[in-house]
Amino acid sequence: VAGLQAASSLVLAAGLGGVYLCWRRRAVPMHAALLLGAWGLVALGLAGWSATMSADTGLARGMVLAMLLGLCAVAAHSLGLAPRKRAGRQSASKPSAVAAPAGNRLSGLVRCIASLTVAPALGLALAVAWRAHGAGGQADRIMTALAIAVVVQAVALVIVLASTRPLRTMLFMAAMTAAVLPLVLDVRP
Amino acid sequence: MTRFANPFNGAFVQRNLSGHKLLGLAAAGLLYLICLSGTATVFYLDLQRWENPQAPEMPQATAQAVAAAVADARTAWKAGDTLDVAIPTPENPRLVVGVGETHRAYDAQGRYAGPADHRLGEALGELHYYLHLPATVGLVLVGLGGVLLLGLILGGILAHPRLFKDAFLWRWRGGSRLARTDLHNRIGVWAAPFHLVIAFTGAAIGLIEVLLLVMALGFHHGDAVKAAAPLFGPAPVSVRQGVMTSDAIVKALHAVVAAYPGAEPDYLAFNNPGTARESLTVYADLPSRLTYGETFEFDGKGVLAATHHITDGPLGRQIYASLYKLHFGSFGGVWVRWAYVLLGLGLCLICTTGMDIWFLKAAQRGQPRPRLHRLWMGFVWGAPVALALASAACLAGLAFRPVFWSLLPVLALGALAAGPPRMISRLGRGALGLALIGLVATHVAVFAGAAFSAAAWAPNLAFGVLGTMLCLSLLRGHGDAAGQRP
């Protein structure tokens, strides 16, 4: 097991090294194929980790290793440990010319209300509706409902806060919640 | 041929950036405190050992020793107290019986070896779980923190069109704002799986109570136990068979190992202890699995009544039971826990750099907010200083909560008078360094020789080295390339 873990770690490191080299030299021929191959090695390394023990634990450990290696690569590149043949890319990120959504007290209030009430209500309503009418056994339905409650709330937050018309967005979400309510009320034990 | 518009156009990105900013500004303080306390509790079990360095340690304990320890602990038990046992494991090589609010340590033969209360570990854990608020309110608030963090991650990714183009770029000499923006984005991108997992599992653990409450009201006439049963398994046995004998406990522990070869019983909880309806719940770890283990229900005679089938039951139950190890990093030994500490500190850094970027942008727009910036810097440095000082106070016998919650506002407000943010940062580093050294000194003063035992030397060394490094960092020159870093 230890040998396979070591080999998987090496494959993972090689894959991330490949991603890094592709990032540094975009002008090489077959760049896309090389990049795909590098990510393939990363996936292979993770699969190797999964094979060394139960898939869930192995994948989790492999992911932790991959994240640490990625951050090490960022540090090594930026702190000058990488070869300085090319001093790294210059970012083309510039301040955007597009103005941020205009905000006033009313839109701020609406965003606040939507974030604190409508988004959680929508998440909870969809979750309970799934628990009542979704597919699968009871435990599966509860777990899926939990995932729905969390993810829907988070996505609703992102949408309402990024919206240029928060009132319209909030009303739309409230309407969705109202549309789901009959499903919630029509529960089955 | 139809051409689709690029969804990541400037307006889309700017809208998401604006939402990301609003959410970040609203939640930064809460998330920073949750992330910091979470990082501190990754080594929760090691902290419990550290604050009781004199307790005996052993790789394992026999079922007879566990039964002997329980028999002894019953002498200290009073009506209404809970009764539970932590069995030695590689992560926590101690035999400790909890009786009500107190904990008692035992040696490998089950003989009493002294008190083993872990007030510091519990206080840190409760800070992360509940922010020291009433349990349900705090758990839900922290769960909502997970939802906010998830929203920030999703919004951040959508607001970041150069996710891969800048994948390895950190222009740390490029001036304050650029260096912080790059650091914020790089940690955010490369540690995104960790952040997503922490946010989702934290939110799920926090919000499950709300969901189960709603489901209990909607589906089970308010019966929360019935609502939770599909996820957590059957309720404990409640049959009138008298108080469990030592033989019954030994029989139960042997039955677990026989039923699941490879399972390592690590925790016992007595239900209705000391009454005629006493029964036993045994938790056993399966080290190769991500679930928190398997759970077995025994009756008062030590006969297996039910298995929860957490490791081989419905997928939903297995997934839910995996949330805990994933959230706390207890699935891969010491190296994964250290990785979680580093990634957790990275998450704290994302919170602080995010706010820094906003302050720097505001200043560059000609709308500086110096007082708010100082207050934030005071909070950022004050929180770990208050944690270290409250921990030292706890070791010395004082209560953790009042010390921590008194110090935090004092340190944050004190920063208003401490000069510019850069000075606050220097003072904060120095204060944290001294607080960590003071923590080690307090530990040595309280426990003397035991401060260098197997359970204590490594944390003391780590705190001492970190504190010294922080103090030494003050000796470096004030200047840097940009000359304006706070």
Image (cartoon, coloured by chain):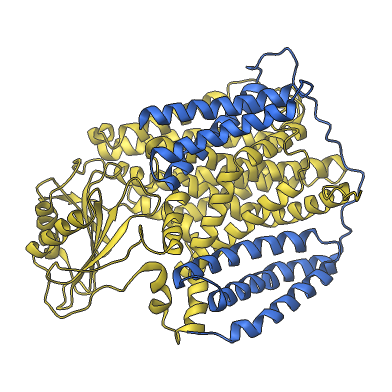
The one nearer the camera, A52 or B409, is A52
Image point 9% across, 54% down: which residue? B64
Measured from the top left, where is residue B374 in percent x and y?
Answer: 69, 44
Image quadrant in which you'd find residue B459: top left
Up/down of B420 relative to B196, above or below? above
Measured from the top left, where is residue B268 in percent x and y?
Answer: 23, 60
> Residue pushed farthest front?
B1
Chain painted in blue in the figure: A
Image point 31% across, 50% down: which residue? B286
Image point 63% across, 25% down: which residue? A18
Q: Which quarter of the rendered picture does the C terminus of chain B lie within?
A: top right
Measured from the top left, where is residue B259 in percent x and y?
Answer: 21, 57
The one nearer the camera, A151 or B272, is A151
Image point 76% across, 64% down: which residue? A160
Query: Is residue B479 rendered to the left or right of residue B311?
Result: right
Residue B56 visible? The answer is yes
Query: Is residue B251 rendered to the left or right of residue A72?
Result: left
Measured from the top left, where is residue B415 in percent x and y?
Answer: 64, 44
Chain B representation colour: yellow
Image quadrant in which you'd find residue B296: bottom left
Up/down of A142 relative to B98, above or below? below
The one nearer the camera, B30 or A51, is A51
Residue B168 visible? The answer is no
Tally of marks: 0
Query: Is residue B349 rendered to the left or right of residue B436?
Result: right
